[in-house]
Image (tube, rainbow, N blue to C red):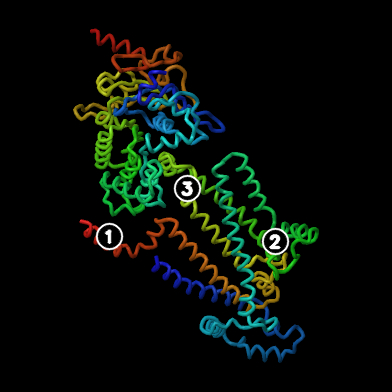
Amino acid sequence: MAQYVLKRILMIIPVVFLVAITIFTIMYFCPGDPAEIILGVGAAAEDIEALREQMGLNDPFLVQLGNYLYRTFIKFDFGTSYANSVPIIDELSHRFSKTFVLAISAIIIEVIVGIPLGMVSATHRGGWIDQLCMILALIGISVPSFWIGLQLLLIFSLKLSWLPPYGVTTWQGWILPIFVNSLRGIAQMARQARSSMLEVIRSDYVTTARAKGLPERTILFRYALPNALIPLVQTAGQSFGTSLGGTVIIENVFSIPGVGQYMVNAIVTRDYAVIRSAVVVLAIVFSLVMLLVDIAFGFIDPRIKAQYEGRNRKYKWRKKLRRVAANA
Amino acid sequence: MENNEKAFLSVKNLVVEYTSSKQVIHAVNGVTFSLERGKTLGLVGETGAGKTTIAKSILRILPDPPAKIRSGEIWFDGQDLLKLSDDEMRRIRGARISMVFQDPMTALNPTMRVADQIADGIALHRGISKHEARHKAVDMLEMVEIPRFRARDYPHQFSGGMKQRVVIAIALACNPDLLLADEPTTALDVTIQAQVLALINELKKKNNTSMILITHDLGVVAETCDEVAVVYAGEIVEKGSVEEVFDHAVHPYTRGLFDSLPDMSSTGRLQPITGMMPDPSKLPEGCKFHPRCPYATESCKKDIKKLVKVSGTHYSCCSATINAAAKVREV
């Protein structure tokens, strides 16, 4: 397992490298001149030309790419924003902490609320509880989050004045964004949990467990749930990864200075340095989350773990044989 | 009622239906049989005849919905299982009645170590600690000839035959009084089949366990069973001791089954039973076998057939052939 994890971590390096090259190339061929953006529309032509020279924008593509990769991966220097000359790494780390809080609390709520809802639905299939859960889930998936966000702001901030209407300077400010951000995830999780539980609940080993006389609770948590967990972890990982990319709508509705907002602003203002850096950071974060998901698979399903350990099998067999010899 | 309480297991007029939104599937239609302690009953019949449904009804593990036990009584050691509460039934399952399932490949939980899968039933029914139960589970594994160092393995590390032996170990872990073996050898290859059957037989004798063996393999029945019941379209069409049924088969369906067995001594072609089993959602009236029966008369198409005594413990529901058989015997 440790060997597998190490291998996977090493594999992240080429992935991130490729992402960086791709995003740099796309940005290079996009119209728009960074020097012009930095100096503003009314700047003199010779000033722009001088800045282009200074930034190395007149160099050939490959030289520029090489310089960019060298700066990013060897010197860990993401450069400064074209728009306001703030170092990108400072801005990103500051904003990322906000997005991270939002994403991690949302994913925790999704798992804690969504999976039990789906399990209850599956075990009461066709009953009114099931119908109610699934209708709620359908609403959760189809209603746009900005609408719910605005409605809740209207009720809890404007009418009742219980919660602050914007910003996350106090803990009360986090309540609404986290709640709204997790709604869709809860719905998705509940639906996924229901369908994968239904599949498992009819399986032969659950019948075997029932034939053993085990109580329903044991059957549900020791036989059904572990086997239904794989697609759920997959969904959770994906949803977490996407959330880490910044939830633009939530961040805008609740005025949270997060990564999503930062990126959208950068795209609008053609702030290429920011876009490039943010994409690279997200690629790293997303790869790490997917690695965590794959490691979780290994712990949930021994068959997957066996695949991971396939290469070490020879060694394991030797150990096992030694044990047999000792027993004999 | 007195009779019911005396017999060890007695199933009376069991009717089971599967309901879907469009149709009702009549899986079991009034099955009656009984079994003494320590004896083995073979339930034979084609796929879809309702054999597994009968066994799962006894254990009350049919998926509900869609399955529903419409009527009938299942008397086991003096109590009607169908009248017990869920909790009382749960205490019988695995402890006094247990089941070996058809497909060992899917019958074990892939995310649990095999010893733990044996141990959880033991811990529950014996009321002992997890730790002690695990020790007993390892003993069970050794009894089915799986070395103890494999106890911490997962099912995917086992071969099909080993998995079936684990399933058997699970079923026998609490020394049940009744074992329901649902085609325990069908999914295994022939050499392993013999091993598994021998193992079941040996363990059964050791613990004086009664068994219902579900199979479509008549050879297996001859080897292991005391009594046999032939199931067709959810009904028992013929039952009796193995000698009675095998040597003097009366019902045309039973005879058809024997005729379609390959015989090494003759060179002629096999004689299959023509036609297909009726669709259980649209069963024919009268005798369910009449569309395929070479001896069918007009009355077979209308009259509902009941089991009639042939001789001793031998019963058949085909009156036409019973009379013929009686005549043969008189001559």
Three-letter amino acid code of the residue under disc 1: Lys
Chain under numbered label 3: A
Q: Is residue A67 left or right of residue A48?
A: left
Q: Residue at x 51, y 83 (%)?
A: A74
The residue that disc 1 covers is: A320
The residue that disc 2 covers is: A176
Considering the numbered disc 1 on the image, is that residue within a helix, a strand or a loop? helix
- Relative to residue B111, is residue B89 depicted above or below? above
Three-letter amino acid code of the residue under disc 2: Leu
The image quadrant of residue B187 is top left
Q: In whole angstroms, how far apart are the C-alphas of marks 3 and 1?
A: 30 Å
Chain under numbered label 1: A
Considering the numbered disc 2 on the image, is that residue within a helix, a strand or a loop? helix
- Relative to residue B141, is residue A166 depicted above or below? below
Q: In whole angstroms, how far apart are the C-alphas of marks 2 and 3?
A: 34 Å
Q: Is residue B275 left or right of residue A61?
A: left
Q: Residue at x 51, y 75 (%)?
A: A17
Chain under numbered label 2: A
Q: In whole angstroms, how far apart are the C-alphas of marks 2 and 1?
A: 55 Å
Residue B252 x/y as whole percent = 33, 19
Q: Residues within 10 Å of mark 1 (few under 14, many from 20)?
A: some
Tell me which numbered mark, 2 or 1, is placed earlier along the sequence: 2
The image quadrant of residue B55 is top left
Residue closer to the observer: B330 or A270: B330
Q: Quarter of the image containing the N terminus of chain B?
A: top left
Residue B233 appearing in the image: no
Residue B122 x/y as whole percent = 37, 43
Residue closer to the observer: B311 or B324: B311
Considering the numbered disc 3 on the image, is that residue within a helix, a strand or a loop? helix
The residue that disc 3 covers is: A224
Three-letter amino acid code of the residue under disc 3: Ala
